[in-house]
Amino acid sequence: MKVMVIQGPNLNMLGIREQQIYGPMKLEEIHAQMKAFADANGMDIEFFQSNLEGEIVDKIQECLGDADGIIINAGAYTHTSIAIRDAIAAVQLPTIEVHLSNVYRREEFRQKSMIAPVCAGVITGFGPFSYHLAMVAMNQIFQEIKA
Ligand code: DQA
């Protein structure tokens, strides 16, 4: 079964942007760790990053018939995008919302997620390890679908 990993705006800047919040690890390194987990657990995986809301909506729509689940860090669009929320609701694939930082101990505007209500769950605050936890959860979801 295949998981689509979708990374939103400014996540291509990991390792450069606000290291005191997001740490030193680059996106490619996080993806390499996720790929290793996928390989070890017999999962297919694909990665997509975009700074553009419409491209993220397009990619979610393309998941229909192409992926069995979605792991998404929508970046700042998490807090604003009804369009991304509607796309997730439309495809009806199990979706896990991920954040590196704990958005609930940051600015008030980050404490509202537009997409959480249409996701299976949310993992926030564990740095790059948030993505590993999301992979563990997605693997569990896939096992339950297969059973
Ligand atoms: C983030 C949190 C968002 O509020 C922020 O806009 C990001 C990154 C995180 O992973 O902690 O770009 O999604």
Image (tube, grey):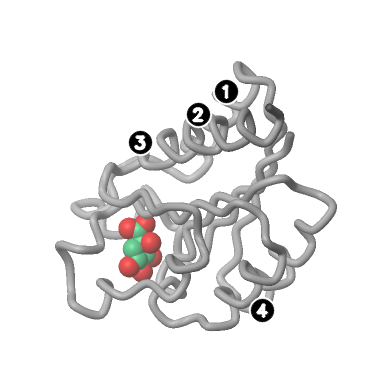
> Which residue position is annotated with label 2?
33
Which badge, 3 or 4, is on the more N-terminal residue? 4
Q: Secondary structure at mark 4?
A: helix
CA gap, disc 1 and disc 2 = 5 Å
Which badge, 1 or 4, is on the more N-terminal residue? 1
104 vs 48: above or below: below
The N terminus sits in image quarter: top right
Q: Secondary structure at mark 3?
A: helix
> Which residue position is annotated with label 1?
36
The C terminus sits in image quarter: top right
> Which residue position is annotated with label 3?
129
Q: Nearer the viewer, residue 123 or 19?
A: 123
Residue drawn at (43%, 52%), measured in percent from left and top? Answer: 121
The verdict on label 2 being within 8 Å of ligand 1 is no
| Res. 87 image quadrant | bottom right
88 vs 6: above or below: below
Of marks 2 and 3, the one in the foreground: 3
Residue drawn at (56%, 70%), measured in percent from left and top? Answer: 51
